[in-house]
Amino acid sequence: MSSFKAFDIAGSGMAAQSVRLNTTASNLANADSVSGTAAGVYKPRHPIFEAVRAQLATHGATAESQPAVRVRGIYESTAPASQRYEPGNPLADTNGYVFAPAVNVVEEMVNMISASRSYQNNVEVMNTSKDLLLATLRLGQG
Amino acid sequence: MPLNLDQYVSVHAAALDVRARRGELIANNLANADTPGYQARDIDFRQAMARAAGDKTVGTTLTTTQPGHIGGATSANAATNPDLKYRTPLAPALDGNTVDAQIEQASFAENAVRYQATLTFLNSKFRGLLTAIMGS
C-alpha cells in the first residue's frame, strides 16, 4: 500500500496546471508582437491534458496502477492572425499591413484564473494528505 | 482468554484503508478537473466495508468449485481495491469532463475528517489497551 500516491497525483496536477499557466503567460506576453508576414506571426499556444490512467489501461496495465494527469502536448492555435493597417510601422509589408497574433486576451485571463484555482486545489489536497499522514504516523502515541 | 489484536482494531484498520484509497481517488478527480473526457470516480464506502468484513453477497464474485476454475477479480475483494463507481454528474462539461470541483472538494474534506475520526477511534483503542496493561 502506498500512502504517498496522493502526493504523486496532486503533484502531477500542479505540474500540468503550471504548464497551462506558462502557456497563458507566453500568449499574454506576445499579444502585441506584430509581424510583417501572416506566417511569421506568433501563434497562441494551449496545452492538452490527458488522464494517465485511461492511457495505461489501454496498454494492458492495471486500471489504477498510476492515476494522475499529464500534458499530452501543446498545440498552436490555427486561428488566422488579424491584419492592421499601420503604414508607419517599419515591420509593415508593401501594402502597409502588419499582422497581430490571434490572442484573445479575455480568454487568456479566464484561463489564467482557472489554472491558478486548479493549482490551489491541488496544493490543498497535498497539504491535507500530508496532515493525515503525519497524524497516522503518530498513531498510538497519544 | 487471549486478545486478538487484529480483531480488536479490525473495523477501524479496514476503514482507514478504504478512507486512504478514497482520498487518492478524489485527489485524482481534482487533478483531472480540466482534462477533456475525464469521468470522475468514487468508492462505494458501504460496499467496500462490507467486503472488508467478509460479506460475500455484495458485488459480483465468481465461485470456484473445480481446480480449473478461474476466480475472477479476486483483488476486487480486498478492502483497498473495491469496485469503483462513476459519479453521476450534475452538470457535465461540453468536453465530456464530469468533475465538479466543488463537490470533489467537499468530498475530500469530508473524507479527511472521517479519516481523522477513524484515527481517533484507533488511538482510543490503543489507549484502552495501555490502561489495561499499566492498570492506572
Image: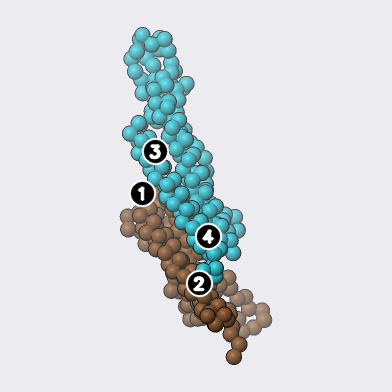
Chain colours: A cyan, B brown
Front-most of residues B83 and B13: B13
Number of the front mark, 3 or 1: 3
The chain to which mark 2 is attached is B
Q: Which residue is labeled 3 in the image?
A: A112
Q: Which mark is residue B64?
A: none
Q: Give the spatial CA distance, label 1 vs label 4.
A: 40 Å
Instruction: Give the residue at the far right of this rendering.
Output: B67
Residue at 64% across, 83% down: B66
Q: Residues within 10 Å of mark 2 (few under 14, many from 20)?
A: some
Q: Residues within 10 Å of mark 3 (few under 14, many from 20)?
A: many
The chain to which mark 3 is attached is A
Residue at 40% across, 29% down: A28
Q: Give the spatial CA distance, label 1 vs label 2.
A: 47 Å
Q: Give the spatial CA distance, label 3 vs label 2.
A: 44 Å
Q: Give the spatial CA distance, label 3 vs label 1.
A: 20 Å
Mark 3 or mark 4: which comes first in sequence?
Answer: 3
Q: Amino acid at mark 1?
A: Leu
Q: Which mark is residue B94?
A: 1
User: Label 1's element?
Assistant: loop
Front-most of residues B42 and A83: B42
Residue A55 in the image: above or below residue A37:
below
Number of the front mark, 1 or 4: 4
Q: Which residue is labeled 4 in the image?
A: A134
Q: Position of residue B81 (x, y in %)?
A: 53, 68
Contact, CB < 8 Å: mark 3 with mark 2?
no
Residue at 38% across, 29% down: A103
Instruction: Give the residue at the far bottom of this rendering.
Output: B1
Q: How many marks?
A: 4
